[in-house]
Image (tube, rainbow, N blue to C red):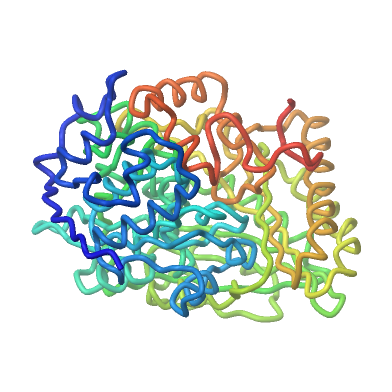
Amino acid sequence: MIATRLILCLSLSAIGGAAQALESPDFNVTQQLLDLGVNVGALPELSNFVERRSATLPCAAACLSLSVTFGRDSVLSRGEAPYESFTGAYWSENQGEVDPYCIFKPANPSAISVLVLLSRLTQCPFAVKSGGHAAFAGASSIEGGITVSLEKINQVTLSSDKKTVVIGAGNRWSDVYRKLSKSDVTVTGGRVSSVGVGGLSLGGGISFFSNLHGWACDNVESYEVVTATGIILTASPKQNPNLYWALRGGGNNFGIVTNFTFRTIPLPGGQLWGGTKTFMEPALDAVVDAFAGMVTDSPQDPNAGLWVAWLKNSGLELAATELWYAKPDGGSAAIFDAFNAIAPIADSTGNKFLPDYTDGHEASNPSGLREIYYGLTVKADVRLARLARDIFYDEYPAAEAVAGANPVMIFQAITTGQMARMRANGGNPLGLDAADGPLYLIHVACWWQDAAGDAAIHAMISTVLARITAEAKALGLQNDYVYMNYASAFQDVIKGYGAANAARLKSIARTYDLTGVFQRLQPGHFKLNRAPVTGTGYFSGLDA
């Protein structure tokens, strides 16, 4: 039993400042830990690393050091019931089956600084989990390393004038909305309640309010970031502006974001209008036309938004169309006329309380199954929308032999209004220009029961997307952008942002992470120079 207890003397004033974050060539991890009040030499399990002797169990040393430093209940270990409960609670079985050496639950950003430095000292890799709603293994979990759960970093602190709110990266969106609804405001957050604040916001972040206000990343006024040196920085338009630009869609490549300061949106009583209208043949062509018309007409009424989910149920082809309006009683708005002219077979639309509305979408995304999101982007054109739908149904039989498979193709829009708002505060790295819009986001989501079906599902969706891409090229409608939050492990998201933006992101990463900590030691999710999984032959969306 380790009796040594380290006294942590970390404070933001001690570790703040851009100059300290820019790493010098002679940066010494052990000295940095000492400067922050952590004497690693007092821990026998770290002595081999401090003295640069061979060490065979880096993650054992790192996990034990975290436990001694922050307390036994801050670290979950293999074989313990809380560890099994944690890994079993991931939305996707793909992630839940990953077996980290330990799970660390830091209570504040200072503890994350120590985690980063201990990882560097021992070379034990790590992953960071906000909500854990990514589909593929390793996105927010890591085999044999340290999974860092941000769940204790969950503040929601509204400013006195109610114009901004500081949101901890460990929050889930439904909890944020419930707290903010008491003050009649909200933010441009996620549409499914259990999705985490961190992952959605760093990947872009589409909201019910995006046609009015832009994506989540475009409504963040500042980020609190733990950098590769353990220094905690603020990134905003005036402080570290290059880092601020990179975090607006650049993912987990630059540091660990612990808090986001969002601009708020008035939403009296937390009320908006929305719900699902479900249609079947012979109305499905009319649904495509209505979808395309709403996307084109979005600038006329940006309160309105939608997605269309194409699916099968008992052999019937169906279109489950989600419509919403950013204020109550929006169902009769003129922008919905085309949909209102089609008779649905089911209709759940009405006024909604935002947290309950996101909970409803959560219920349609069950946990504990194998999952994939896999998507692309094309220029908006009703001809291509019809072709995409038909290709999906044409390839659908390939999934029917897979136990429990439920593939769904979803149409959404990146409207010109959304893209125009991406230019604010120096823009973002996504590479989207309103002059090229509007665009369609088309992705296939699927769940199924077990790993035996993985190859068949991956191949089926890969074929669907490759065929759509071929049609888009033939029509002159291809677009290389891939939305990070709907991308599969086989896609190089950053490459799709365009060569100039990808190069700038890599340059910024070198500035704030000289030795590539967030590329090497945090290897999961979408890195700056590769897809998470390579060499499979599945659809990537980009020429090699």
Q: Position of residue 506 (x, y in %)?
A: 46, 24
Residue 228, position in %: x, y? 33, 35
In the figure, residue 36 lies in which quadrant?
top left
Q: Quadrant of the C terminus?
A: top right
Instruction: Identify the image quadrant of the N terminus.
Output: bottom left
Q: Position of residue 334 (x, y in %)?
A: 52, 60
Please name the residue shown 32% across and 26% down the image: 242
| Among the 4 quarters of the image, the one containing residue 310 | bottom right
Residue for point 72% across, 67% down: 319
In this rendering, the answer to whether 194 lies above or below 161 is: below
**Numbered circles on residues, count:** 0
118 or 417, nearer to the observer: 118
- Residue 193 visible in the picture: yes
Q: Residue at x 20, y 53 (%)?
A: 164
Does residue 251 appear in this view?
Answer: no
Image position, residue 412 (x, y; %):
60, 52
Q: Please give left or right for residue 499 compared with residue 356 in the image.
A: right
Q: Is residue 535 above or below residue 205?
A: above
Left or right, residue 191 beside residue 412: left
State which quadrant residue 102 falls in. bottom left
- Image-based side of 49 in relation to 375, left or right: left
Vertical comparison of 474 with 123: above or below: above
